[in-house]
Image (spheres, rainbow, N blue to C red):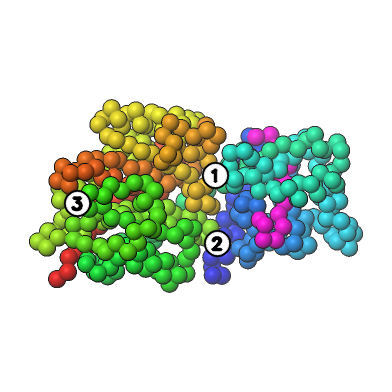
Amino acid sequence: MRDRAEFIDNILAKRVELLLPKLMNDHKLDMWIIISREYNEDPVIKTLLPATWISARRTTILVFARKGDGSVGAYAIAPYNVGNVFEKAWDKSKQSNQWLALNELIERYQPNTIGINQSDNWAHADGLVATDKENLLVYLPEKYKTKIVSAEPVAVGWLEQRIPEEIAVYKDIVKLAHAIIAEAFSNKVITPGKTTTDDVVWWLRERIVELRLQTWFHPSVSIQRSDDVVLEHESSATHDNGKQIILPGDLLHVDFGITYLRLNTDTQQHAYVLKPGESEAPQYLQKALLSGNKLQDIFTGQFSAGLTGNQVLKRSRELAISQGLKPTIYTHPLGYHGHAAGTTLGMWDSQDGVSGDGDYPLHLNTAYSIELNNAIFIEQWKKEIRIMLEEDAIFDQSGVWYLNGRQTAFLLIKPNQ
């Protein structure tokens, strides 16, 4: 845990040094004020606190201010020292009022724009609560009240962009998540004819605890098989069928994510339960899986910096449909949050685009859960199934690449011997 804390704090210092000056300069934001009270934390402030701070303390005010040389000063107006990144800017022995101490810092910089965390499109960038805003405005000198603007573009940019050191460790985090799924979808965990989908879900939760990790959502495991049941999106993400017993011939699906070093994963993969005498999944299912890979390729091939999520979604769906696929695309940013701030590229129930965050342009050095499915009719089963895939990827100058590869073959579970 000590090593984790050191890593997190080092990453924070580098991000403040490398990312913030450009973000604030690009968006002409002279000052960014983030205010939170203990246990009612702004989503952004959680990414700025030292690793040893589990929450804000009392009222914690963090301020970033642009300097004349293009750098950014980082200040904490708080009753305690806030790590090594932030310079303490409140001496209670000299100024008993915290809000007036903030005013003194504002007067020192005399900013033309003061950003606060308010946003219509992203909850992540909308963390300034009503009471804290009221206090800010009560004490703020009148001449600065007209300088208040939304810090949305800086807040979203801060949350969505990754630095090289984060990308390097992200590869290992996704590799770990893949390894946990591979173990879950194996005979170590599953005994066909006995193990239920709910058993696998709770094994995943236990494994996370054993590895001293966290998860940001409860996993789900679902089954598609040769019967008259058609799996819908809602049912694949719920646990109403948690007592389903896993049988030979089943096509299994998992949705699973971990949180480690403040970064999140989000993965969906498939496994096949072999029937006696089988050594691989039937060719018709393997072909179905490849159709999902084809949709991934079509989709990620449309990524281009500056295009909006809605534009990429529209182009991808049109191209996929023209090639005989039946796509549903619902890809989201990934990083400090599982469903993170940044460009949204469809939702499962919004295939014509998403207003607001879907109109936001793609930026380089951002991470995404490439989440989608292709529906395909299986003649042997006399029904349509969905290949539901989700793999974590980085979008940079080279294009989209997967942090630890992607699933191109089923995980296989042997029948009882």
Around disc 2, counting alpha carbons within 10 Å, would you say few (fewer than 14), some (14 to 19), or many (20 or more)?
some
Q: Quadrant of residue 183?
A: bottom left
- Disc 2 marks a residue whose amino acid type is Phe
User: Which residues lie in the magenta part?
Assistant: 27-41
Q: Is residue 285 visible?
A: yes
Q: How many marks?
A: 3
Which tag, 1 or 3, sits closer to the chain's start?
Answer: 3
Q: Which residue is mark 3?
A: 226
Which tag, 1 or 2, sits closer to the chain's start?
Answer: 2
The mark closer to the camera, 1 or 3, is: 3
Residue 37 located within the stretch drawn in magenta: yes
Image quarter hosting the N terminus? bottom right
In three-dimensional space, the C-alpha distance between marks 3 and 2, rounded to whole angstroms, equals 49 Å
Q: Which residue is mark 1?
A: 341
Residue 162 located within the stretch drawn in magenta: no
Label 1 with label 2: CB-CB less than 8 Å: no
> What residue is rendered at 67% in x and 44% in y?
117
In three-dimensional space, the C-alpha distance between marks 1 and 2, rounded to whole angstroms, equals 23 Å
The extreme right residue here reads 94
In three-dimensional space, the C-alpha distance between marks 1 and 3, rounded to whole angstroms, equals 39 Å
> What residue is rendered at 28% in x and 68% in y?
195
Spot occupied by residue 135 in the image (x, y as percentages of width and height): 81, 49
In the picture, measured across the screen, residue 40 lies left or right of residue 234, that is right
Is 261 above or below relative to 112?
below
- Disc 3 marks a residue whose amino acid type is Ser
Which tag, 3 or 2, sits closer to the chain's start?
Answer: 2
